[in-house]
Image (cartoon, helix red, strand yellow):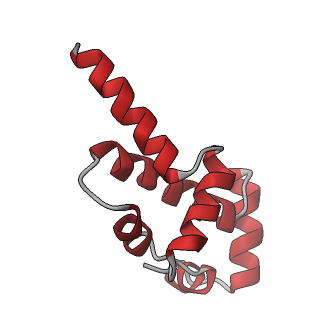
Amino acid sequence: AKIRVGDAARQANMSASYFTTLFKECTGETFRDFVLRCKMDKARQFLAKNDMTIAEISEILGYEDYRSFYRAFTKHVGYTPSIYQRALRTVGETKQS
């Protein structure tokens, strides 16, 4: 699902520019950075479950194409989604041994 600042501002009965200014003032981060952080946190949870493909996760998080999600995740987390998922799988297998 796409999360747009205009939609959030309308829900709060504010103009988009006032909403973004107030959001940054109150949270210390931009609305865009907040949404990205939430999406990446959710992506990590999905990757940890290990029952979804990366393409499915990117679609659920509102990315129109897999490559955009892949780039955003890699930039935000520091690992590609597949390496992150593989590392979690390896840790899980180690704990079960």
Q: Position of residue 86 (x, y in %)?
A: 42, 40
Q: Where is residue 3 in the image (x, y as percent from the top left)?
A: 52, 77
Say how many tags the image has: 0
Quadrant, the C terminus: top left
Quick one: 20 or 93, which is closer to the camera? 93
Quick one: 1 or 71, which is closer to the camera? 71
Left/right placement of residue 25 relative to residue 68 reads: right
Quadrant, the N terminus: bottom left
Name the image quarter holding residue 87. top left
Left/right placement of residue 11 relative to residue 89 reads: right
Q: Where is residue 59 in the image (x, y as percent from the top left)?
A: 40, 75
Q: Position of residue 15 (x, y in %)?
A: 68, 86
Q: Which residue is drawn at 44% across and 55% down?
A: 43
Q: Which residue is drawn at 54% across and 85% down?
A: 7
Q: Which residue is drawn at 49% across and 42% down?
A: 84
Quick one: 50 or 18, which is closer to the camera? 50
Left/right placement of residue 68 relative to residue 25 reads: left
Quick one: 6 or 65, which is closer to the camera? 65
Q: Which residue is drawn at 42% across and 54% down?
A: 42
Is residue 93 positioned above or below 8 on the image? above
